[in-house]
Every structure is written in C-alpha cells, then in structure tokens.
Amino acid sequence: MARCLPNLTLSHRTIDDIWLPNVCFQNSKRTSVHESPTPNIFLLIYPNGTIWVNYRVKDKLSENYNLRNDLFIIFEGIKCLPNLTLSHRTIDDIWLPNVCFQNSKRTSVHESPTPNIFLLIYPNGTIWVNYRVKVEAPCELDMTSFPMDVQRCTMTFESYSFNVGRVRLDWFETGVILDIQGKLPDFELARYTWQKQKFYYPAGQWDQLKATFYFRRTYGYYILQLYMPTYASVEAPCELDMTSFPMDVQRCTMTFESYSFNVGRVRLDWFETGVILDIQGKLPDFELARYTWQKQKFYYPAGQWDQLKATFYFRRTYGYYILQLYMPTYASVFISWIAFWLDPKCLPGRITLGVSSLMALTFQVICAKENHTNNYH
C-alpha cells in the first residue's frame, strides 16, 4: 500500500500528466462551470519591509479566490493530496483576476533568484496566489502642523481588467498584517486601517480595497536642531536715531516672510495673540517700552508676498549718562567760572583752577567714549 504524502509540489510539465491538456488552465477566460457568476477574491497583505514617503512598501500580496464549482480543478476524491503547490511558471496558464495597485508608481516582483510567486490549489478548487512584491506609491504631504504632523498615505487595490460583473474583491477578516523590521528615518507608523469601497468608471463599477497608513513624524530632531537654535540666535540690524540722546526711544523692526513662495502658494498671518514676549534679564542700556505687530503686502518682481512685521520700541536708561557724564561735565564748567571771581593778581591760583577744569573735562570725554555702546543686538 502506497504511503500518503502530506502535500505535493509539482513542476509545470507534470500538470499535463494529471489532467487533460489545455482543459483546466486557460488564461484567456475563466472556466464556465460555476453556480455564481463571479468568483470571490479575498486579499491579505503582509508588509515585511520598509515603508517610507515617496513611499515604498516591500510586502506580500495574497490573492485567494474560490472556483469551488469548477469541476476541472477539484480533486477532493484524492485523499492523499490535501493541496497542490505549483511552480511559478504555471501562473501564466491560470486565469487570474489581475489585481493591481491602482495608485502605484512602480511595482516589481522579487526575484531571488526566481520570481517569488506562490501558487497553491486546494482540493475544493480554491486557488491561493501569493506575490512578494515591492511597491512605490506617491503620498501627498500635509505640512500644516510640521514638525508635529501626521501623514496619511493610501494604497488602493482593484482588478485592472474586470468589473464587479466578473470579479468581486474583499478583505480577509484579518485585513492588513504588519511586521515592520527596523525604523523609518523620519517617521513612525502610528496606525493603519483598511476598507472596501466601490468606484464607478465609464466601463462599469469596480471593487476597490484601500489600505491607509498614518505616519507620525519624529519631531525631536527639528526641536533640538532647528527650532531651539532659531529662537536663540536671531540677530537683526536696528538703525539708531540719536537726536534726543540720552532720552531717546529707538524703533527696531523684524520682518517675516516666506523665502520661496508668494501668496499663490503660502499665506502668512499672525495668531490672535500676536507677539508673546518672555524676557528674562535686562538689556544693558535699554528697556522695552512697548511693541506692536502688523501684516502687510510687499511686491517683488516675482509677485506678491505676505510680510509680518514686529516692531519693538526701546527707551534708553539715561540715569548713567546724567550721573556719569552730564553732571560731572556741568560741575567742571561751573568750577572753571570760579576763576573769574579770583583777584587778577592771584595768577597761580587761576592757572591751577583752569588747568584742573580742562583736565577734568578731557577725562570726562575719554570716559564717555570708552563706555559708550556702539552696537545693539
């Protein structure tokens, strides 16, 4: 008595020895003996590689469709053969629903070294086809909340050749199963969903299966390397008006605009709160009197730009100048007048007082130049 084998893997040439030639596998049309008009195809995705934006998925796409009543491929009577695994070369001789990635840019089947296609037939006529493919699909990015944004990327599956009159698509109950190894360079997968929907083309109605992946940006790099240094290192020029020195008020302006895009691509505006200041410490020579903000438009040869202006008004702290410059200078001048009340015969005293006053004035001028701040940041 022959021993039963748990399963059997056959080559392409062996198929003709089991069934009648060109009866079971005709890829030009489906076999005609069916109780239901359309085969039900169930898809299951096993991504097992890297996903990124522009974004690329290395995954396994499984198609499992039932031709249960196709009398030519049912072998339930063979008890020793629980299933039949065929070579990838046989795939061209079997009718397939031609499921494709509807929104892909590039798709390729892995070859290591032969095409990674798995084909299995169950005794009841169910055919299981498994592809190991690499898919690259576009993903439109919404940068509104950058760098704390969550991007939504979608992959759509549909039959390229057959509408719902010939092929019906649906997900397995488990849907998308992920086994991601490693990490994405700039994102982490937050969650994923899958759904079935209908789409209407001029040729009829198609079933579409959508898998949606939500990627959350890892924003730690941007906070540490971009935002914090930006907040700490803004340096801008400010033209000083010294007319009322030292009781002057200086007006300094900072202007924000998009460097690359005009109002056709980017619109700028202030929040309702406008500028919020949290000044720690004091400026060496000024105090902030007030500040304002406004929005305006500016016209370059390339078009119109939005500009946001923040204006700061700094009042000079003039106490130092009164005590260290003006009062000593006036005092020296007043002292020099004493010489006019001295007797003209007291020539040594008048000379001493005049020279002392002149030296005091010279010393005050030198100190004022050394202590005067020329640049303000």
Image (cartoon, rainbow, N blue to C red):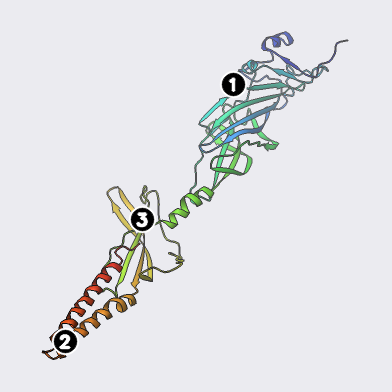
User: Can the viewer see residue 113 in this picture?
Assistant: yes
Determine the secondary structure under disc 2: helix
Q: Name the residue type under label 3.
A: Asp
User: x, y (%) of residue 165?
Assistant: 63, 29
Counting other residues with Cα less than 10 Å from the Cα at mark 3, is it few (<14), some (14-19), or many (20 or more)?
some
82 sits to left or right of 360 = right
Mark 1, residue position = 111
The label number, if any, that marks residue 339 in the structure image: 2
Answer above or below: position of 318 versus 58. below
Residue at 44% x, 57% y is 231
Residue at 72% x, 19% y is 85
Counting other residues with Cα less than 10 Å from the Cα at mark 1, is it few (<14), some (14-19), or many (20 or more)?
few
The label number, if any, that marks residue 306 in the structure image: 3
Q: Name the residue type under label 2.
A: Ala
Report the Cα–Cα distance between label 1 and label 3: 53 Å
123 sits to left or right of 226 = right
285 sits to left or right of 93 = left
Residue placed furthest toward the right: 1
Residue placed furthest toward the front: 348
Q: Name the residue type under label 1.
A: Glu
User: x, y (%) of residue 366?
Assistant: 25, 70
